[in-house]
Amino acid sequence: MRVLIVGSGYVGLTTGSALAYLGHEITLLDIDADRIMRLKDGEVPIHEKGLNELLSEARHNMNFISTWNDFDSSADIVIIAVGTPNKGNGDVDLTYVEVVAKSIGERLNPDSETIIINKSTVPIGSARRVKTIIEQELKKRNIVKSIDVASNPEFLREGEALFDTLYPDRIVIGTESQSATNRLLNLYKPLLEQSFIPPISIKRPEGLPLPSIITTSPTSAELIKYAANSFLAMKISFINEFAGLAELVGADIKEVTKGIGQDSRIGSRFLNAGIGWGGSCFGKDTAAIMYTANQYNFEMPLVHATIKTNYKQRESIIRKLQSELKVLRGSTIGVLGLAFKPNTDDLRDAPSIDIIRGLLELGANVKVFDPVAMNNCKKQYPNLNVVYTQSADEIFEDSHGVVLITEWEEFLHLPYLKLANQMKNKLIIDGRNVLDKELMLKCGVSYKGIGRGE
Ligand code: UDX
């Protein structure tokens, strides 16, 4: 199939390279001419596991363009994958999506059967909005035509985006017509077959079931995306709430998690207690769905509490340090990890930034280390008054306390005995419950996890 993908960001590029691997002819359109030039030159602008390799396997099926003049006006499918930033009040800024819809309507070949897909996470009703804009533009060209706009949300995790694209649990297809559903099924057909030959870089795990297809209305598909992310965020906040209680009653949340996660109705995933969630999706999507509910004067106390509990986790780190050190002014606190999760340099809604700001406000001196996110941090937060160290080890020197914020693999294997001896005060707050508690105690460290009942 001939597929145009608008937006070469995270979603556009990973989806595009995966679909090109499946054998579709992909054109990736981005108005950022510089980015397109670099993509044409073989540069990969985002850090995503296996993307370099997949792009080299699939590049022969990919074309990169930076102007709508080169647009194939009778493509089989146009996928909209542009940014949908938060306006700051929870509302989603649809400007980029609307500009794309207008551009499609201005150029679409009236004889084509092109299906438009909303891949970006968009507010409820966006499929209809895009349809209206395109049809209005066509009307200006004296063309009366009904356009199929489908909602086909992605559920990609950063760092695992290609795996999630090639081996999803489910594919949600929200359309109003059978022909659009059929075309989308064709788009993903190879993924639905046992005979699918996986790319070298992203193998299919043995025994993984084939994805199920879920066909819905566009509005249900739009809501599915918000419900999925809110539910995952809620699971994390739920266990974090119990972690708070576990500390008071003297239970270990890791044991509690094991005990409830084995119940298949609950499941063990997304039940790791800690500093809470960050990243580009959970915060934005929970805020957006609250905004939508509010427009209907409808209350969503569970989502509200999910958000509240999450941000309380960040504060709780400061409370733990205060309770141990009493006075933070003049103390030196080491921070291990800045990225919102390991294996990324992404700082969007990263708990580290709130925690560091809180520490600085209380007069602490803060040293930070992250294996990949420090440059990003310097760029995005030039006024953050911290000392960036060259290594994780340096974080411990003369510190009154060290907080582990991101569970990078290398932080699990530091020479803790040696490092503890270099601290002014042997206190480690493990914000992700990943360090070996027994080892910490052997090193003479006062070890505080999250909900570990110390
Ligand atoms: C998430 C969803 O998983 C994905 O389906 C959606 O499309 C986008 O949002 P992502 O933000 O890349 O993906 O990261 P994910 O791996 O899901 O982690 C999100 C946050 O939750 C991280 O900050 C992580 O540290 C935190 N988390 C996750 C926990 O605190 N505990 C857990 O048990 C799991």
Image (tube, grey):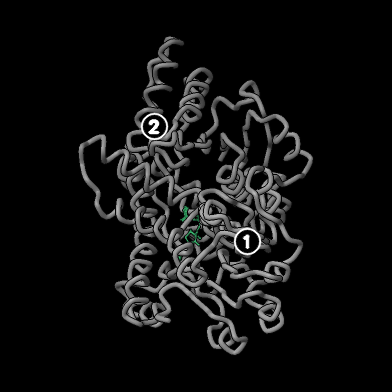
Question: What residue do we see at 61% from left, 48% from top?
Answer: 23
Res. 158 in view: no
Q: Nearer the viewer, residue 345 or 422?
A: 422
Give the residue pinned by disc 2. Answer: 148
N-terminal of the pair, mark 1 or mark 2, is 2
Quarter of the picture holding the C terminus: bottom left
Give the residue pinned by disc 1. Answer: 343
- In the displayed structure, does residue 82 sit left or right of residue 267? right
Q: Give the spatial CA distance, label 1 vs label 2.
A: 38 Å
Could you say whether the residue bearing mark 2 is in a helix, strand or loop? strand
> x%, y% of residue 349?
51, 50
Question: What residue do we see at 35% from left, 82% from top?
Answer: 250
> x%, y% of residue 89?
39, 36
Which mark's residue is nearer the viewer, 1 or 2? 1
Q: How many marks?
A: 2
> x%, y% of residue 191?
51, 57
- In the displayed structure, does residue 320 sit left or right of residue 220? right
Q: What amino acid is labelled 2 in the image?
A: Asp
> x%, y% of residue 240?
38, 67
Q: What amino acid is labelled 1 in the image?
A: Asn
Res. 37 in view: yes
Q: Nearer the viewer, residue 123 or 335?
A: 335
Residue 410, located in which quarter of the rendered image? bottom right
Quarter of the picture holding the N terminus: top right
Residue 401, located in which quarter of the rendered image? bottom right
Eyeballing the image, is 81 above or below 320?
Answer: above
Could you say whether the residue bearing mark 1 is in a helix, strand or loop? loop
CA neighbours of label 1 inside 10 A, class few (<14), some (14 to 19), many (20+): many
Q: Nearer the viewer, residue 223 or 368?
A: 368
